[in-house]
Amino acid sequence: MEREEEIQFIQQAQAGDDDAFTQLFQCYYAFLYKYLLKLTLNEDTSVELAQETMMKCYVKLSSYKGDAKFSTWMISIASRLYMDMLRKQKREKKWVEDEKHVLSRKLAWEASTKGMNWSDLFTDFNTLDSTLRIPILLRHYYGYSYDEIGKMLGIRTGTVKSRVHTGIQKLRKELDMP
């Protein structure tokens, strides 16, 4: 799109012409999506961020001053949305980890007050990723077969065996066991 044509569409869109914004959207969506795909390496996230970016561009179009190309303004919005998403994911991950730690300590305390034996193994077990923890729990605590676990989780039996093995190896490493 030529710069003069871009400016004309922007002015029309700022004046309330939704068709003009549609033209901008159609012109820049592929460019925006490809940028986000390179940034996120995830198609679903890229589509979601591209849609959110275009919505934000539409809502905030009146704040566009024309100092830079529309695509530059749009990319800056997309980049900020991506960084915000990363910060949010980091906060959520930290919160989940903190909650798991608090819950593990609470369970250990409750077990000790009831005279139950609480092992450090269980505390270490709770730090495992859920993809490893769930198959181990189903296999070694509940006694399900590898085939049954595979059917429950929708994964192949070999994958279940691998995850159980990997999880147990990690636990052994944490406890310095051979």
Image (spheres, rainbow, N blue to C red):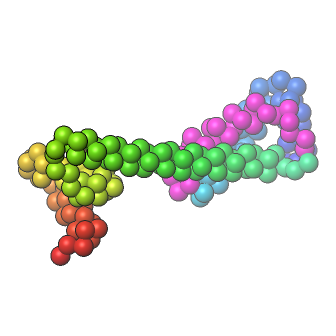
Residue at screen point 83% across, 30% down: 13
Per the picture, the main secondary structure of the magenta-coloured stretch is helix
* Position of residue 84 measured from the top left corner of the image (x, y, whole percent): 64, 46
With respect to residue 170, does 3 lie above or below?
above
Q: Is residue 13 left or right of residue 132?
A: right
Question: Which corner quadrant holds the C terminus?
Answer: bottom left
- Camera-side residue of 135 and 118: 118
As for residue 132 lying within the magenta part, the answer is no
Residue at screen point 85% across, 32% down: 62
Q: Quadrant of residue 119?
A: bottom left
* Position of residue 118 measured from the top left corner of the image (x, y, whole percent): 20, 51
Residue at screen point 8% across, 48% down: 143
Q: Is residue 145 left or right of residue 60?
A: left
Q: Quadrant of residue 8?
A: top right
With respect to residue 17, does 164 lie above or below?
below
Residue at screen point 32% across, 47% down: 104
As for residue 53 lying within the magenta part, the answer is yes
* Position of residue 34 measured from the top left corner of the image (x, y, whole percent): 62, 53
- Camera-side residue of 26 and 177: 177
Count how many numbered circles sit on residues in the image. 0
- Camera-side residue of 171 and 115: 115
Q: Is residue 170 left or right of residue 65?
A: left
- Camera-side residue of 143 and 27: 143
Q: What segment is highlighted magenta in the picture?
A: 40-66
* Residue 59 appears anywhere in the view: yes
Residue sitting farthest toward the bottom: 178
* Residue 23 appears anywhere in the view: no
* Position of residue 99 measured from the top left corner of the image (x, y, whole percent): 41, 44
Q: Quadrant of residue 25?
A: top right
